[in-house]
Amino acid sequence: MSHEAQEQRELTAVNEGLRQRVSVLEEHLWRIALEVRAARIGVRPELGEEWWSDPAVAGLSNRQAEILRRVVRGDRIPAIASELFIAESTVRNHLSGIYRKLGVHSHAELMARLANGKT
């Protein structure tokens, strides 16, 4: 058997091994995804429109209200900054003001507060 043929056989064996590992990993990922879905991890609570009428939310500036709408929609800071043509640090500064006015300290607290209608 030539050296090239031997190398080809070895590469074929390596590729087959990689395919099997990928298949096992995909199976594990699907199982994890199903568990995450069943546990409702990462599922945002449904927010009705009634939270907009709250006095604390009504006290936000127009820009803060726009950023809050986008955060509730699920947008991330880079996307918000890009769409509003402002720096990411400016979005973060507005979020800090929103947190302060609504009495929360994190994104998770903000979403929980809005979902519970306790702003």
Image (cartoon, grey):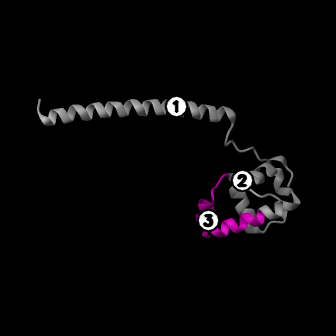
Q: Which residue is mark 1?
A: 28
Of badges 1 and 3, nearer the viewer stands 1
Instruction: State the residue at coordinates (32%, 30%).
Output: 16
Residue 84 versus residue 21 in the image, above or below: below
- The circle on residue 81 is 3
Q: Earlier in the sequence, mark 1 or mark 3?
A: 1
In magenta stretch: residue 84: yes
Residue 75: image quadrant is bottom right
SS at badge 2: helix
Q: Which residue is mark 2?
A: 72
The part of the chain drawn in magenta is 74-98
SS at badge 1: helix
Q: Could you classify mark 2 by the number of other residues whose Cα lies within 10 Å: few (under 14), some (14-19), or many (20 or more)? A: some
Q: Earlier in the sequence, mark 2 or mark 3?
A: 2
Q: Position of residue 117 (x, y in %)?
A: 85, 50
SS at badge 3: helix
The residue positioned farthest toward the left in the image shown: 2
Instruction: State the residue at coordinates (58%, 35%).
Output: 33
Q: Work out whether residue 84 or residue 56 is closer to the camera in this orientation and state it.
A: 56
Q: What's under tag 3, amino acid-wise?
A: Ala
Of badges 1 and 2, nearer the viewer stands 1
Q: Position of residue 6 (x, y in %)?
A: 18, 32
Instruction: State the residue at coordinates (59%, 60%).
Output: 79
Tell me if label 2 and label 3 are in contact, CB under 8 Å.
Answer: no
Q: Could you classify mark 1 by the number of other residues whose Cα lies within 10 Å: few (under 14), some (14-19), or many (20 or more)? A: few
